[in-house]
Image (cartoon, rainbow, N blue to C red):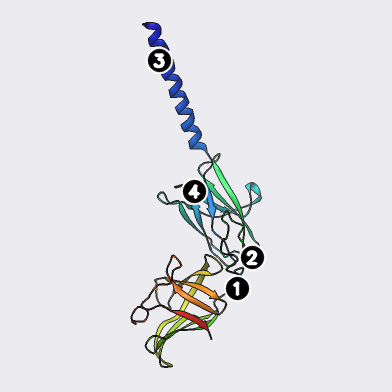
Amino acid sequence: MKKFKLASFIAALAVALFVGSTSASAKTASPSLSVNPVVNNSKTITGRATKGVGIVVRTGRGSAGKTLAKSTASKTTGKYTVKLKSAVKTNQKLYVYARRSSTSYFFRIITVQAKSANSSSTSKTNSSSSKSSNVNISTPTGTWKSNSHNGYNLVYSFSQSKGFNSYLYKNGKKVKTVVSYASYNVKANSPKFWQINYQPKGSKTTKKFYIHFSSNKRFYLVNSKEKVAKQSIAGRPAATYYFNLK
């Protein structure tokens, strides 16, 4: 009986040690990491990693680089956003780390693209590159006029000196200034899909909208999932809008 109890104890101990060893290995496994395309003049790095891990953006590996910014991946989705103090430049290399500890980490080397680039040096393959070949936009600078709804149309103006301005027209005559002298910045999620962040002059609130370029001279207003959707602007009934470069 005693031999049986001793054998059972040894077996249980072996199982416990095995489970403990397995758990420790899982905890020290390298975290996962993907990085979305990074384009010229961007000030944010986004992507997805193991939930809750630290995200570090550096100019190089180890002592060869310096830390630019840090963030933390969401504990529920794994998504992250790292805000940089200064904009990145085309062909600049960034080292993006997902770090659980000093011995448990994973990194990717990202090359900053020109905004017209169709290829990606990230962990994701750009499956729409062949469809994006007709889009070669580096900036929205210029005046864009929307399609008409019941005689009304919008005009968007992007200027390096005057910022972002928006006007409502009816039958060719301006009837309202919607946005005036707003500072703005662009986040290119892909060569075709952009997020425009703007802050009207005198306002402390930053707003945003999304656009999808179908060509170099036309974009559509879309939602955050890049789907064309009806939108209410300047008090007008909700409608779908596309804009042509004037």
- Up the image or down, 96 lies above or below 155; here it is above
Residue 90 badge: 2
Closer to us: mark 3 or mark 4?
A: 3
Amino acid, disc 1: Asn
Q: Nearer the viewer, residue 238 or 58?
A: 238
Badge count = 4
**Between disc 1 and disc 4, whose residue precedes?**
4
Estimate the spatial distance between the alpha carbons at disc 1 and disc 4, rounded to whole Å.
38 Å
* Horizontal and vertical percent position of residue 41: 58, 67
* Distance CA(mark 2)–CA(mark 1): 21 Å
Q: Which mark is residue 54?
A: 4
Q: Which residue is drawn at the image coordinates 45% and 84% (left, top)?
A: 147
Give the residue at x 38% y 75%. 231
- Residue drawn at x 64%, y 52% as measured from the top left: 60
| Callout 1 touching callout 4 (CB < 8 Å) | no
Q: Earlier in the sequence, mark 2 or mark 4?
A: 4
Q: Which residue is mark 1?
A: 134
Q: Position of residue 193 (x, y in %)?
A: 51, 68
Q: Secondary structure at mark 4?
A: strand
Query: What label sits on residue 9 in the rendered view?
Result: 3
Residue 246 is labelled as none
First-in-chain label (3 vs 1): 3
Say whether residue 65 is visible: yes
Query: Residues under labels 3 and 2: Cα distance?
Result: 64 Å
Q: Which of disc 1 and disc 2 is earlier in sequence?
A: 2
Q: Earlier in the sequence, mark 3 or mark 2?
A: 3
